[in-house]
Amino acid sequence: MKMIFRWFPHGDDTVTLNQIRQIPGMTGVCTTLPHIPVGEVWTKEEILSVKNEINSFDLEMEVIESVNIHEDIKKGFDTRDMYIEKYIQTMKNLSEAGVKCICYNFMPVMDWFRSNLALDLPDGSNAMSYSHNYASSLSLESITKSIVDNSNNFSMPGWEPERFHEMADSIKFYETMSIEDYFKNIKYFLDAIMPYAEEYDINFAVHPDDPPWPLFNLPKVVNNADSIRKYLNLNTSKRNGLTLCTGSLGANPDNDVPAMAKEFSSMGKVHFAHIRNVKFTGDKDFHESAHLSDCGSLDMFAIVKALYDNGFDGYIRPDHGRMIWGETGRPGYGLYDRALGSNYILGLWEAIKRLS
Ligand code: DNO
């Protein structure tokens, strides 16, 4: 197991590599090249320039989060073969730079979503939260505006304002596509890239839908144990795996996250784990919390133990943190609460290992 930290390059982060390397137990970062338009090839030069910067702080860059998938692939358009070819070229370039794992998602149109990026908590901290009734009452335009207005001027991957019109058109498009057709498009993509994932020695770790239920009637494909089984069975390469995001899956109390950790890590399919806690506040309502079990609704000990006991040997990163101690920054991605979270997880890991 390797503990890593999410970091955004090119000055688009309040957290520095120097700070990250001082967090006990941190071996590297996962990052992305956010300025390259989705679908275009990541050149070796651009990859190496970020990798060299990361390595100069004695941190590794073995995980990329994310290489996003062009909507034409998700929609099954004729242009998908061209985008798949470019995706494979990016995989080759990343593998030559030592990347071992790519985290990506197959969420249509938009990535994760929260209805409030800074809910004030009683202890003076703030955290991201979600209320389904409220979210369902909002138009796409007001949702996009609220995300952008509350992002503290950081890019919010998947919510770039210039995507608004494309998003609106895409939502209409998906009204005409069945979930089975959507799965066919996923399979087409997986069948095309998995032989290269094997050749280039790269694990693929699909991120669950977040939140794990439909919004705007968009197809949701990775949101519970059944849909994960279905996704993994679309292509049986051992490279076709999961990002076990405990907070995304755990937002639905019907999801037994320790059982999922057990099932999918025993199959060798959990390549990456995003470990965070959420506190249920109502039906389909939650806010994010500090990582400790006592602070939220998830049993973090049981999740980490299930990973350990079932031979998990991938990457873990602490996930969204609260904003504490007056910190401001990209919602969910400050330094302090994530640093605390990482060391809580490392503490659990050490205790479980020693007692096993
Ligand atoms: C949210 C993140 C996601 C994740 C992508 C992976 O904070 O976990 O945006 O990076 O879904 O492609």
Image (cartoon, grey):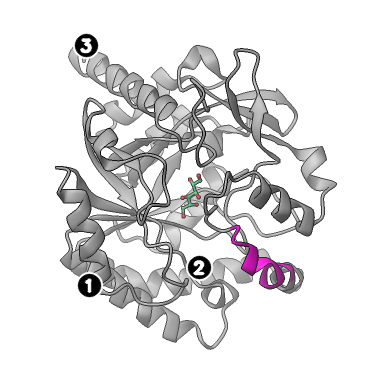
Q: What residue is drawn where x is 78% and y is 53%?
A: 142
Q: Position of residue 72 (x, y in %)?
A: 55, 78
Mark nearer the N terminus (2 vs 1):
1
Q: Position of residue 249 (x, y in %)?
A: 54, 38
Callout 2 touching callout 1 (CB < 8 Å): no
Mark nearer the N terminus (3 vs 1):
1
Closer to viewer: mark 2 or mark 1: 1
Q: Which mark is residue 63?
A: none
User: What residue is shown with label 1?
Assistant: 44
* Start-end of magenta stretch: 159-168
For disc 1, the neighbor class at 10 Å (few under 14, some 14 to 19, many from 20) is some
For disc 2, the neighbor class at 10 Å (few under 14, some 14 to 19, many from 20) is many
Instruction: Answer yes or no: is residue 48 visible.
Output: yes
User: What residue is shown with label 2?
Assistant: 186
Residue sitting nearer the eye, 125 or 170 = 125
Check the image and report above or below for 284 versus 161: above
| Label 3: element kind | helix
Check the image and report above or below for 200 versus 318: below
| Label 2: element kind | helix
Q: What residue is drawn where x is 64% and y is 33%?
A: 118
For disc 3, the neighbor class at 10 Å (few under 14, some 14 to 19, many from 20) is few
Residue sitting nearer the eye, 280 or 323 = 323
Task: Tell me which corner region of the image, top left, top right, bottom left or bottom right, holds residue 334.
Answer: top left
